[in-house]
Amino acid sequence: MKHRHLVIYAAVLGAACGRGDTSPEADAGEALVPRDQTEVETPATDTAGIPTDGVMYDPDVAVPGAQPGPGPVSPPGGGSQPAPGGATAAPSPPPAADVQGDEGAAILRRAAAAYENVRSLQADFVMHFENPLLRQQLTSRGTLYQRQPDRIALRFTDPAGDVIIGDGQYFYMYQPSNNPDQYFRQPAAAGGETGVNLQAQFVGNPVERFSYTLHGSESVAGRSARVLTLVPRQRAEYRSLRVWIDDRDGLARRFEITEHNGTVRRFDLQGLQVNPSIPDGVFRFTPPPGARAISG
């Protein structure tokens, strides 16, 4: 049970940041839940989730690979612009052309070009988890940090003080909201490299790796985005991935993972910064005094 808890939260971390295992074998009824979980018609168990609400994004953050689209246009001049947190935005490349006239393919290729430029990333997140079989939901919030190739961290504000950290060697999960006297540790290699790493999904040739369906446009916190469902053409650790690709910068501002067991995890990113300078300490876990390590 404790080992499964670590694997499931490593999966959440992988989904958001690029490492972890969203394995269908993970028991849908064993997700570790913060003490302040919200339940909707919930049977007695420790898994939960919450309906998704839109969150606000920073409309003024320029990012590498940005291109004009049907949404708000970039400021005139086309030159580099500073972004929050020390990020530096690159000039926009020319719009991608799709000779076959396939709009979905053109959007995926544009996203691939944008993600090629991502070396680090920081964003506030709202993560919603839903298990439709158990009719349970939960929500959590915090800040996501990622630095290529293998540094990742989720530092929670709700539940406050909870952390999930990948330092390249181990994944750590510490939840003082549930148990301040122990933390979980799992070798990074045990999490696998097949979790939903958004950058990995788009860089290269996503048109060949996925069957894709374009659902049209939606407004995400006032920003125009194209919505696609991606289904891996070969066996993967998830069933499908729905992404909301921003019309202005080509990056996903919302994504939703559906696992083989029906569990859905949805992430909304706010205040997205691309290529900020992130201190090494953000990716370092110091065990609290007296806390016991539980190895995965």
Image (cartoon, grey):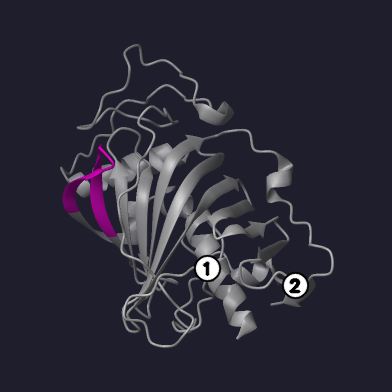
Report the front residue among 145 and 49: 49
Above/below status of 122 relative to 160? above
Visible residue check, residue 117: no
Query: Toward the viewer: 270 or 112?
Result: 270
Question: Does dot 2 land on a helix, a strand or a loop?
Answer: loop
Verify CB contact (< 8 Å) between mark 1 and mark 2.
no
Q: Residue at x 73, y 60 (%)?
A: 169
Q: Nearer the viewer, residue 131 or 255?
A: 131
Report x, y in % for residue 128: 39, 63
Who's the residue at 52% across and 25% down the image? 88
Q: Which residue is mark 1?
A: 11
In the image, taking residue 189 as reference, residue 210 lies left or right, namely: left
| Circle 1: residue type | Ala
Q: Position of residue 205 (x, y in %)?
A: 38, 50
Q: Visible in this render: residue 128?
A: yes
Q: Amino acid at mark 2?
A: Asp
> At 37% across and 30% down in the image, what residue appears?
66
* Mark 2 neighbour class, 10 Å CA radius: few under 14, some 14 to 19, many 20 or more: some
Q: Give the structural element (helix, strand or loop) at label 1.
A: helix
Q: Earlier in the sequence, mark 1 or mark 2?
A: 1
Q: Is residue 181 left or right of residue 86?
A: right
Residue 40 falls in image quadrant: bottom left
Number of the front mark, 1 or 2: 2
Part of the protein shown in magenta: 215-229
Residue 229 - label: none
**Which residue corresponds to mark 2?**
181
Magenta part mainly helix, strand or loop? strand
Q: Is residue 193 magenta?
A: no
